[in-house]
Image (cartoon, rainbow, N blue to C red):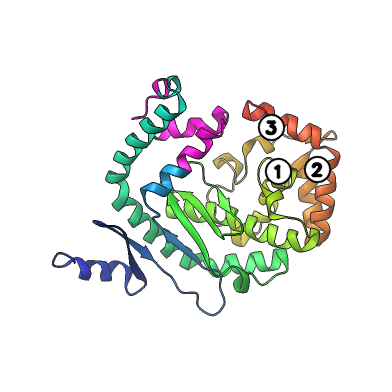
Amino acid sequence: MFYPGVMKRISELFGDDYYIAFTGISEARLHVKIVPEGGIMDIQFTNPGADYMIRQIMLPLSEGETAFWTEPLYHFYPELDRDYAKSLPFPEKKSYIEHTLRAAYLKLADTIDAKAALYAAYWAECRAQVTDALSEAFQVDCAGIFHDLRCNLSMSPIAPRYLQEKYFDVFYLNSEKGAIGSSIHEIIHFVWFYVWNQVFGDSYEEYERPSLKWILSEMVVESIMRDPRLCSINPYFPREEGGCIYPYFFDLEAGGELALTVLDQMYREQPIEEFMKNSYAYCQKHETEIRRHIQEAEGGNMA
């Protein structure tokens, strides 16, 4: 199965914590698996393969999103001719982008595998403090609930999360520290909506963009991330480094006040369940202002 010396080199890199999945007749992917040690949140970092990545890349393009969501693809893949792609009917555009990025994936597959191992190793150093910080913030046993998360490395710069399926994407160009910073952002969403669902008893279908519940969940990440155990390991936390939330929230005003300032004060003064109720009531009161600001920032309509 392997050329001489390959198994030895894999063992040197990953020890015993890996497995190999055959994704085609002539293709296999190496996955790093870190087993939690005594009740700690765990993430499996994996290369999901080209088919998955192409599907993820096409999502914002096929849904008619604004340039806010689609332009990053052309920025990170200059081999894609933006003007040519935009001139094509959607089926031809899809074929052009897919063909170009499949060729790119063939060159990047080994790098993505190596990044998965790098991210997993750094997560192993950080996961205990992340578990403790989020368990305290949300007053739940994060270790018992979120011991089986999966992170798919992706060629797409847009990285969604799937709450009920317990997996999310991270852009492969992140450093290990950037990947864990992005992962913490996503994990906060998982825990937030787990607790939220218990408080409100609503549907997970209501937690996706562009619902007001989704908007609030994105706004509160900065306040939760302010815990030193979290912000200290997230290089994106400082606003001057881009921030850990959508930057258009920084200057969002609602009711004549900066919305993030209002929410941050609520978060620091209220138990988490009370904060969820009051912060949502605040967003409902100012929903028109909030949506108008986001629409102007993204350059399109927001239903």
Residue type (three-letter) at the residue carrying disc 3 = Met
Q: CA distance from mark 1 to mark 2?
A: 9 Å
Along the horizontal axis of the image, is 10 left or right of 56? Answer: left
Along the horizontal axis of the image, is 4 left or right of 274? Answer: left
First in sequence: mark 3 or mark 2?
2
Residue 50, compared with residue 18, is above or below; it is above
Residue 85, compared with residue 303, is above or below; it is above
Label 3 with label 1: CB-CB less than 8 Å: no
Tell me if mark 2 has few (under 14), some (14-19) or many (20+) residues whose alpha carbon lies within 10 angstroms of its own.
many
On the image, the x and y values in percent for residue 302 come to 69, 32
> Which residue is more in the foreground, 68 or 202?
202
- Viewer-nearest of discs 3 and 2: 3
Residue at figure coordinates x 81%, y 56% from the top left: 275
- Magenta segment: does it hold 174? no
Residue under label 1, please give it: 215
Farthest residue toward the left?
A: 4
Label 1 with label 2: CB-CB less than 8 Å: yes
Q: Which residues are magenta?
A: 56-84
Along the horizontal axis of the image, is 29 left or right of 166? Answer: left
Which is the main secondary structure of the residues drawn in magenta? helix
Residue under label 2, please give it: 283
